[in-house]
């Protein structure tokens, strides 16, 4: 192995000690997909506290499109830290906030005047988008989709799907939320063609405006253009076009949650650009900060300006240190060179993974868009019964052999790949061979 170098088992002795302290000091509900304890990281490489060198295929759940510690980002953080750390946008003006907003207004889809509100996490930015849409339209209702993940604040948790993992036990959720199915082309109902299924899904969307929600009460439709947590499900362009049409017709706001699929992950700065559909608002977080906690709600100026003076903002939103990092990150993430690397990188992953469907009985599907790729595991290729157990076992084996991975999927039966897009071909091939070996071992052991 050229890039992976293991000197202990994972976790090694030092890692075990720190994990035991984590268990004692932090709540049991704070999950972790691996037993890796990080000491340092650079690009696609991570070193743990026991001296093991690993390859990162999780990228902090899509936070590291530019890899660990991109040079320009780190330099900008150092420079800003030497000037001032924060003064709060509700108290003073600082240029990094303004410059980042100008940049995001420019690089997001839509040739109309835009404004940007910054916050600290993806959840906050989604919540801001929905609340601003409600304020502007003076309407309460929001349509969201099955499998969607939008965060863990009370409102965004209400918008999030997947009950057992995310919502169970947390009491009643926000009202005025309507959740509809989104077409998943891997799970077309028996007896339907792809075309029929797509048209049926679109019809269900229209039908919801009769059966579930008054179109005159509809404030927004919120969708991830490629569903992340649900299992990298690219939403068909026709479905996105229908959402756009309904929003235009009813006066509702179309919000694209690009927290996971945006920031250049799919070969465009925003994934929705592949469809040609222009949303009214875009939400970004994760990779736009290259590891710093920062997020953005970007929208048509007249919508963003609707809220009364003092109605939005927070103590940390657009923190200067995070904002300068994001300025450098967004400049790179939106550059033609990065976007074509993302496309090429995605094609390379696809070419390496595509044969797995016919080679391994447990691999039901490999899919995704650009460099956002995933493997779905099933007990039976015909029935497509999800196999969350084998996905977990494969992750355990692959991690113990030096790659960092995380699951996904409404049924927790998928492994998602969100490696740094700056990963070299050599690193990609080595990492995927580790994953493939784990799939082969578990696959044939299971038959
Ligand atoms: C699509 C999407 N929206 C919103 C969020 C919430 O972001 P955060 O965890 O930064 O609050 C996530 C996080 O995974 C996400 O994937």
Image (cartoon, grey):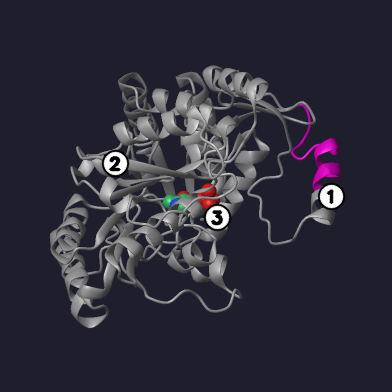
Quadrant of the image occupied by residue 385: bottom left
For mark 2, give the secondary structure: strand
Mark 2 is surrounded, within 10 Å at the Cα level, by few (under 14), some (14 to 19) or many (20 or more) other residues, namely many
- Name the residue carrying label 1: 20
Left-right relation of 49 to 63: right
Instruction: Measure the C-alpha gap from mark 1 to mark 2.
Output: 48 Å
Magenta residue span: 7-19
Specify whether residue 17 is painted magenta: yes
Mark 1 vs mark 2: in front:
2
Which of 265 and 416 lies nearest the eye of the viewer? Answer: 265
Q: Which of marks 3 and 1 is in front?
A: 1
Say if mark 1 contacts mark 2, CB within 8 Å: no
Q: Residue 390 shows which numbered tag? A: 3
Asked whether the beta carbons under mark 3 and mark 2 sit within 8 Å of each other, the answer is no
Tell me the residue at 17%/69% (across/down).
200
Q: Name the residue under label 2.
A: 114
Q: Quadrant of residue 136?
A: bottom left
Mark 3 vs mark 2, foreground winner is: 2
Look at the numbered disc 3 and say if its residue's Cβ is closer than 8 Å to ligand 1. Answer: no
Q: Is residue 380 magenta?
A: no
Q: Is residue 307 left or right of residue 164?
A: left
Where 136 sits versus 414, above or below? Answer: below
In this rendering, position of residue 264 left or right of residue 118: left
Could you say which disc has been placed on residue 443 in the image?
none
Residues packed near mark 3 inside 10 Å, few (<14), some (14 to 19) or many (20 plus): many
Can residue 285 be seen in this snapshot?
Answer: no
Write the residue at 39% across / 57% down: 308
Q: Nearer the viewer, residue 108 or 417?
A: 108
Q: Which residue is drawn at 28% across and 46% down?
A: 301
């Amino acid at each position: 192995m050229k890039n992976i170098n293991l000197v202990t088992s994972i976790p090694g002795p030092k890692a075990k000690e720190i994990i035991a302290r984590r268990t004692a000091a932090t709540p049991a509900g704070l999950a972790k997909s691996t037993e890796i304890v990080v000491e340092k990281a650079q690009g696609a490489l991570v070193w743990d506290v026991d001296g093991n060198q690993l390859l990162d295929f999780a990228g902090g759940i899509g936070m590291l499109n530019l890899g660990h510690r991109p040079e320009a980002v780190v330099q900008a953080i150092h420079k800003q830290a030497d000037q001032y750390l924060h003064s709060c946008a509700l108290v003073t003006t600082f240029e990094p906030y303004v410059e980042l907003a100008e940049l995001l207004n420019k690089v997001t889809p839509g040739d109309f005047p835009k404004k940007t509100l910054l916050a600290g996490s993806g959840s906050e930015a989604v919540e801001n988008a929905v609340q601003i849409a409600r304020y502007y339209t003076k309407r309460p209702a929001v349509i969201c989709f099955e499998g969607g993940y939008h965060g863990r604040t009370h409102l965004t948790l209400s918008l999030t799907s997947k009950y057992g993992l995310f919502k169970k036990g947390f009491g009643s959720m926000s009202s005025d939320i309507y959740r509809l199915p989104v077409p998943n082309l891997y799970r077309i109902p028996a007896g339907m063609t792809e075309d029929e299924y797509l048209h049926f899904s679109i019809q269900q969307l229209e039908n919801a405006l009769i059966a579930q929600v008054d179109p005159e009460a509809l404030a927004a439709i919120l969708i991830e253009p490629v569903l992340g947590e649900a299992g990298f499900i690219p939403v068909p362009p026709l479905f996105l076009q229908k959402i756009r049409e309904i929003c235009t017709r009813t006066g509702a706001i179309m919000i694209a949650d690009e927290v996971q699929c945006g920031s250049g992950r799919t070969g465009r700065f925003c994934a929705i650009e592949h469809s040609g559909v222009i949303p009214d608002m875009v939400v970004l977080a994760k990779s736009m900060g290259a590891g710093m906690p920062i997020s953005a709600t970007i929208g048509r100026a007249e919508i963003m300006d609707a809220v009364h003076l003092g109605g939005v903002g927070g103590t940390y939103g657009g923190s200067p240190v995070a904002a300068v990092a994001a300025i450098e990150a967004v400049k790179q993430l939106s550059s033609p060179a990065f976007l074509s690397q993302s496309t090429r990188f995605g094609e390379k992953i696809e070419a390496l993974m595509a044969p797995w469907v016919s080679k391994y009985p447990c691999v039901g599907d490999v899919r995704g868009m650009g460099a956002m790729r995933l493997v779905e595991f099933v007990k039976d290729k015909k029935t497509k019964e999800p196999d969350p157990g084998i996905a977990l076992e494969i992750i355990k084996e692959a991690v113990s052999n030096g790659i960092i991975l995380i699951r996904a999927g409404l049924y927790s039966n998928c492994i998602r790949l969100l490696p740094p897009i700056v990963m070299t071909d050599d690193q990609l091939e080595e990492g995927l061979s580790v994953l493939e070996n784990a799939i082969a071992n578990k696959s044939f052991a299971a038959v």
